[in-house]
Amino acid sequence: ADIAKLALGDTVTIDTIVPAGVDVHTFEPSPTDAQKLTDADLILMNGLGLDEWVLTLLESAGKSEADVLELGEELIGFEYIESAEEEHDSGAEGGSETDEHGHGAIDPHVWLDPAGAQLYAERIAKRVSDDRADLADRIAEALGTGVEQLTALRDEVAAKYAAVPAEKRKIVTFHDAFGYYARAYGITIVGVAVAAPGQDPSAREIAALIDAIRAAGVTTIFSEVQFPSKVLDSIAAETGATVLADLYSDALGAAPGDTYLGAMQANATAIAESMQP
């Protein structure tokens, strides 16, 4: 929704179904949410297996897939990353299969790379401009401002990491959400605490992560806003690492993380500071 604001400004009314701070993987929509879809002219979802439950609401809302824009699907010129979660789920067959709280074969967290967020914004602007030609000029102006903000964000975050030696750019996160972010900024993800939200790691997986943390010399483990977890505390106790600031991944939160730009800046500050000696 906030990326849509970067794309469209105040040219249209933008509403959301999933509240801030709530896990999109396990969110259970209500009848009120279905009514929001009924009232909408366009429904935005991420796709790539992240929020497939949206599609189950279409018939009851009197909508079809023609009313939906799946932002992450088939982005031109964007190199996707295979989902580590899919590799973990040995019962999955085929690239589009997902488990109850899972993704598909492709990592869906495209927006955590500002370049991916810009592709989302451009896709939103094009679709709404096509649907509402009378708004096209205003949307083009709004998108131009939004792209300028995203470009400034990309440069600002890159500058934070440029000051960190490459061998120090290592992190451990709660779940497999930061692949695109890590690729954009030359960060190595040493490991993740859980393969997928809602799934507890096995004793073997925890032991392997503990070994990896010790070998890499990582001193900080990052939690995520919408995922309170005792698993991180136990891993930190075993390794001597510190569980640090909640990162923004699948959800926004309180200020300054109540906007996409603010959340990304907060993430960069927290992560870069953890890499300092």
Image (tube, rainbow, N blue to C red):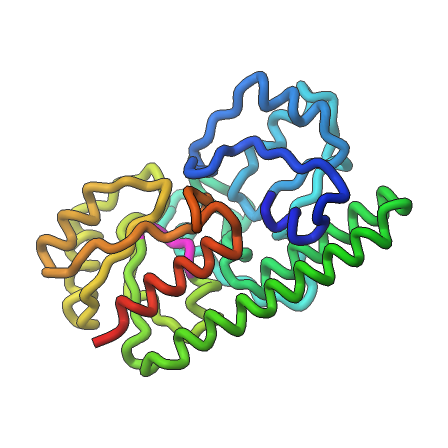
Give residue 182's quadrant in the image: bottom left
Examine the rendering and report whether any part of residue 164 can be seen. Answer: yes
- Residue at horizontal 28%, vertical 66%? 190
Which region of the structure is painted magenta? 174-178
Provide residue 146's location: percent of width, then percent of height.
66, 59
Q: Which residue is rendered at x = 69% and y = 53% of the image? A: 7
Left or right: residue 243 compared with residue 4: left
Q: In the image shown, does 255 or 23 lie closer to the viewer?
A: 255
Please tell me whether residue 262 is drawn above or below residue 272 in the rendered image: above
Q: Residue at (32%, 82%) from the top-left corner?
A: 165
Q: Image check: 213 left or right of 268?
A: left
Please tell me in which quadrant of the rendered image residue 267 appears.
Answer: bottom left
- Identify the image quadrant of the N terminus: top right
* Residue 106 visible, this orientation: no
Quadrant location, the C terminus: bottom left
Residue 58 horizontal/vertical position (percent):
67, 26
* Residue 128, image x, y percentages: 79, 45
